[in-house]
Image (tube, rainbow, N blue to C red):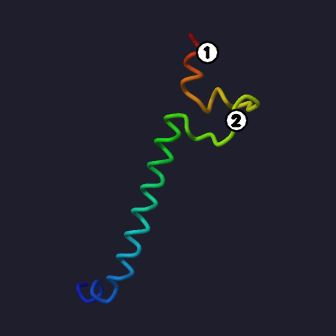
């Protein structure tokens, strides 16, 4: 097992870095979605704007 790790440490390192980058990207996407930043265009003509932005939905329910 130790020999295999020594022979493949470069691939393991690159794979770990890529996995870490993927985790960071997914966390950022989740954070943006929760804060309402997931939309990249204007929402005035969007049929799903009430589902996209939690704040707007909460304000309209009051």
Residue at 46 percent across and 41 percent down: it is 31
Label 1: state its secondary structure.
Answer: helix
- The relative height of residue 32 versus residue 23 in the rendered view (above or below) is above
Q: Residues within 10 Å of mark 2 (few under 14, many from 20)?
A: few
Residue 12: x %, y % from top left: 36, 77
Q: Residues within 10 Å of mark 1 (few under 14, many from 20)?
A: few
Residue 5: x %, y % from top left: 28, 83
As drawn, the residue found furthest toward the front would be: 42
Residue at 46 percent across and 48 percent down: it is 28
Rendered image: mark on residue 35: none
Task: Give the mark nearer the N terminus: 2 vs 1.
Answer: 2
Q: Quadrant of the N terminus?
A: bottom left
Label 2: state its secondary structure.
Answer: loop
Residue 26: x %, y % from top left: 48, 52
Q: Quadrant of residue 23?
A: bottom left
Relative to 40, 54 lies left or right: left
Relative to 51, 26 lies left or right: left
Q: Quadrant of the C terminus?
A: top right
- 3D distance between C-alphas at marks 2 and 1: 19 Å
Q: Quadrant of residue 18?
A: bottom left
Instruction: Name the mark nearer the viewer: 2 or 1.
Output: 2
Q: How many marks?
A: 2
Relative to 49, 53 lies left or right: left
Rendered image: mark on residue 42: 2
Relative to 25, 50 lies left or right: right
As drawn, the residue found furthest toward the top would be: 62
Residue at 35 percent across and 82 percent down: it is 10
Residue 57: x %, y % from top left: 59, 22
**Residue at mark 1:** 60
User: Observer-nearest residue: 3 or 27?
Assistant: 27
Residue at 37 percent across and 70 percent down: it is 16
């Amino acid at each position: 097992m130790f020999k295999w790790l020594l022979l493949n440490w470069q691939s393991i390192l690159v794979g770990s870095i890529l996995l870490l980058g993927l985790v960071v990207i997914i966390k950022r996407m989740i954070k943006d979605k929760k804060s309402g930043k997931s939309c990249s265009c204007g929402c005035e003509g969007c049929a799903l704007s009430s589902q996209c932005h939690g704040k707007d939905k909460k304000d309209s329910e009051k």
